[in-house]
Amino acid sequence: LQDLRDRALGDGGEGTREERGKRREAAALALADGLRAAGRGPELAALLTDLRPLFAAVSKAKTAKIVRHVLDALARVEGTTELQLRVCAEQAAWAREQKRTFLRQRIELRLAALRLDARDFSGALALAQTLAREVKKLDDKLLLVDIHLLESRIHHALRNLPRSKAALTAARANANAIYVPPSTQAQIDAQAGALAAQEGDYPTAYSYYFEAFEQLAALGSAEAPRSLKHMLLCKVLNGDAHEVPGLAQIKAGLKHRGEQVDAALALAKAYKARSLGDFQATLEKYRDALEGDPKVQTHLKKLQDTMMEQNLCRLLEPYERVSLGHLAEALGVPLKDVEGRLSLMILDGKVQATLDQGAGYLIVYDKKPEDPVHGGALGMLEGLDSVVEALMQRSKQVMA
């Protein structure tokens, strides 16, 4: 590494200026890869400052290439999020001083994404919106696609679905006007899948995630297993957990088997068995893959509630009066959670029952048959309403 450092920071030896620049550039890229493999994050961060004399000797395009390569290498070193935030802020300030607009915009986009990962939503959104206004004047559509896509992710994290969908629509509009790399198109499809899943349209979300997975798998991206996990979880959320093992056995699925896919398979198995105990054990075992993924975390509570309701309905079938403690013990969940879920099920009309909290019992009633008179009465009232509206329109015409 020391030899590479000397070559990158030296004069490049003999030859023309272009040849010396190429040798120094190759040494700088190799040095960044070596430091990444050694996990030396602070030295990678300092490398960008040390290489500034080289940046003055090579073209702006090569400078941008080296800076992006070093930042990518730093991103692959674990536990360097804070360091990346500092380095990106410093490099953006340097690029602004040097009037390297294109490089600065790319670094600021990376900085906004890092702020999103660090859950600094206001800082990420402010920077992304400033960038969007600036880049619109330059009409750099590819960069605009990335900015609007990031905006969509930020609004999604803030649970602002209308603005998230609007930003995604803007990203698609710009993408339709240019050639978009497959990796970017995969990100667009993955974000569309996340929004569809948030609205409860799981079949559509599955289709989008499938498109994203196919593209990422063709590229050999490390994000492919994550898209496959989201794809399989959409099947679980849609109540088709029995299809998940078969989907995971396809050729592309077998290639990307790992913790991400195993977590989805375990969750599908627990859902199919309607076992809350297995569900909780799966969450504990695959905490990083499930609760550590913001796109999955939002759906885990809903999935758990659905499983609890299914189990409660099955347990209540033979009873007219049942102890709440017995239900809690059978499900293996706290009594308070059972009471809360039963209250909501009664209010939603999913269970015909009354809670006797003083005695700690649930009194279950037989489901009342629907009275056909009610439906006929409603139909008659709707017919009368349409007749009155028609008469009102005619009277207005006569008066006119």
Image (cartoon, helix red, strand yellow):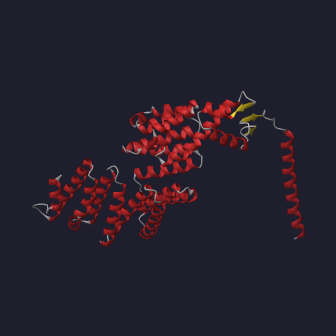
Q: Which residue extends farthest top?
A: 318
Q: Nearer the viewer, residue 85 or 361?
A: 361
Q: Where 316 falls versus 229 (above or below)? A: above
| Rendered location of residue 329, percent (x, y) | 62, 31
The answer to whether one can see residue 172 in this image is: no
For image coordinates 87% across by 62% down, the residue present is 392
Looking at the picture, does residue 229 appear above or below residue 122? above
Query: Which quarter of the figure has residue 55?
Result: bottom left
Residue at the (71%, 31%) spot, across then down: 322
Q: Is residue 67 left or right of residue 170?
A: left
* In the depicted structure, whether residue 343 falls above or below residue 365: below
Query: Could you say where residue 27 lies in the image, as x and y percent from the top left?
Result: 19, 55
Can you tell which quarter of the image residue 161 is in?
bottom right
**Residue at the left extreme, as displayed:** 14
> Horizontal and vertical percent for residue 317?
71, 29
Residue sitting farthest toward the front? 358
Q: How many marks?
A: 0
180 over 205 or under it: above or below: below
State whether residue 224 appears in this view. yes
253 and 306: which one is in front? 306
At horizontal 44% and vertical 61% (from top left) the residue drawn is 147
The percent coordinates of residue 61 (x first, y second) are: 28, 63
**Along the viewing direction, whichever of 44 and 131 lies nearer the viewer:** 44
